[in-house]
Image: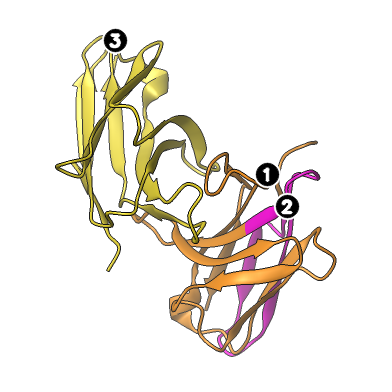
Amino acid sequence: DTGVSQDPRHKITKRGQNVTFRCDPISEHNRLYWYRQTLGQGPEFLTYFQNEAQLEKSRLLSDRFSAERPKGSFSTLEIQRTEQGDSAMYLCASSPLGRGPYGYTFGSGTRLTVV
Amino acid sequence: GENVEQHPSTLSVQEGDSAVIKCTYSDSASNYFPWYKQELGKRPQLIIDIRSNVGEKKDQRIAVTLNKTAKHFSLHITETQPEDSAVYFCAAGDYGGATNKLIFGTGTLLAVQP
């Protein structure tokens, strides 16, 4: 499969617990993005990596959120002390270097439900 | 701040009719405008995009127009088919600029009635 893979597809967690999601981008894509999508809304930008460097972060990314891409390949998004408002679909996307926001390929997302 | 407004939020058309979805952006630096189709429970998929150096782009039954002066861009789908039913998102970004994010609209639920 040459697409963007995300794991898990679904996650149900109790409020206050920590969760971690994984994204495997298309192998030749240097750029990786995390977005959050709530019901009835468009995706909202969270953060952007170029290789292993995190170059841009949204104000939406509070100090409970952290993202890494240690070797410039897969990325993880961790949410600490989850709140009900964190319930959403978390989407990962990747694009080739040199294309800016062009050529995004999205993964199928991880749906988080905080109970 | 950066904002993309999208209208209408829902659109119902008869099979074979045309559908038009409109978006307005606020950031003058935006020069790249993609459209995504998202079927229920699936990932957003790019269906067409336009850069600000052109005013119109067409791909079979789908076309996008851009009015940079008015900061408006629109998606036109002709001869709609039931499989066109989905949520459509517009987005705006700065191709080649310092930022690499896309700002998305709130989506339009298109229902094509057979």
* Label 2 sits on residue: A30
Q: In which quarter of the image is residue A2?
A: top right
Chain under callout 1: A
Q: Residues within 10 Å of mark 2 (few under 14, many from 20)?
A: some
Q: Does the magenta stretch include residue A9?
A: yes
Q: Which mark is residue A96?
A: 1
Which chain's colour is orange? A
Region of the chain picked out in magenta, as a range: A6-32
Q: In this view, does A72 lie above or below A93?
A: below
Q: Which amino acid does label 3 sit on?
A: Glu
| Residue B29 coordinates in the image, percent (x, y) | 33, 54
* Drawing shade for chain B: yellow
Seen at 37% across and 39% down, the residue is: B87
Using the numbered discs, state the Cα–Cα distance from disc 2 to disc 3 in whole angstroms: 38 Å
Q: Counting residues from the N terminus, which is met first, the one under dot 1 or under dot 2?
A: 2
The residue sitting at the right extreme is A71
Q: Residue B79 carries which label?
A: 3
Using the numbered discs, state the Cα–Cα distance from disc 1 to disc 3 in whole angstroms: 34 Å
Seen at 30% across and 39% down, the residue is: B109
Q: Which mark is residue A38?
A: none
Q: Is mark 2 on a helix, strand or loop?
A: loop
Q: In this view, does A114 lie above or below A41?
A: below
Left or right of residue B3: residue A105: right
